[in-house]
Amino acid sequence: MTDRQTIESLLHTLYAARVRGDLDAVCQCFSADAVMSIAGASDSNPIAISATGAKELRRLLAMVMKSFKLSEYHQLEQLVDVPRAAVHWRARIHSRITGSTVLTEFMVLIECRAGQISRYTEFFVPR
């Protein structure tokens, strides 16, 4: 069983690692069989990607973190209802592909098991 304090600490670790671009630390937050989905809209294209299991998840996260650099991370709200959590956050996202930087809002739904994230669903919209 994962308790509230463990989930809060896990979320802090996850977002700190994501902001600094530490792929290994981000991947350590997820269980070996984790499921991740990311969906959102950019200025020109909707985006929907997913991964299941450590190998696919690492490949997806590596691509996302290589393509987009986060700055000015700000958590707006966090709700924990063990074993789930929801996080509303905002950051400036710099695309290493286009060179543009866009303020973006995120809503993330997380499910935890044994101190790791087993399901992660992220929705985003540029502002």
Image (cartoon, helix red, strand yellow):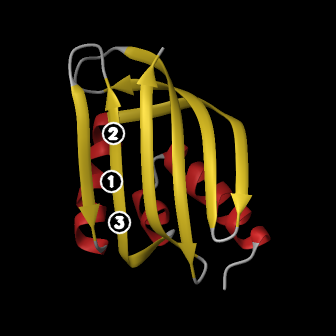
For disc 3, the marked residue is 35
Could you tell me residue 84's position as x and y percent?
A: 61, 64
Secondary structure at numbered mark 3 = strand
For disc 1, the marked residue is 61
Name which residue type carries label 3: Val
Name which residue type carries label 1: Leu
Whichever of labels 1 and 2 marks the residue nearer the N terminus, that label is 2
Furthest toward the front, the residue is 81
Look at 53% across and 39% down and name the residue there. 107
- Residue 22 is labelled as none
From the image, which quarter does the N terminus lie in?
A: bottom right
Label 2 close to label 3 by CB (< 8 Å) = no
Q: Nearer the viewer, residue 93 or 3?
A: 3
Secondary structure at numbered mark 2 = strand
Between the residue at mark 1 and the residue at mark 3, the CA separation in whole angstroms equals 12 Å
Instruction: Please indicate whether residue 99 sits to the left or right of residue 101 in the image.
Output: left
How many numbered marks appear? 3
For disc 2, the marked residue is 39
Name which residue type carries label 2: Ala
Secondary structure at numbered mark 1 = helix
Which corner quadrant of the image does residue 82 belong to? bottom right
Of labels 1 and 2, the one closer to you: 2
Furthest toward the right, the residue is 5
Look at 56% across and 57% down and name the residue there. 14
Between the residue at mark 2 and the residue at mark 3, the CA separation in whole angstroms equals 13 Å
Instruction: Please indicate whether residue 46 sits to the left or right of residue 3 in the image.
Output: left
Could you tell me residue 35's position as x and y percent?
A: 35, 66
Could you tell me residue 9's position as x and y percent?
A: 71, 64
Look at 58% across and 50% down and name the residue there. 15
Instruction: Please indicate whether residue 89 sits to the left or right of residue 43 in the image.
Output: right
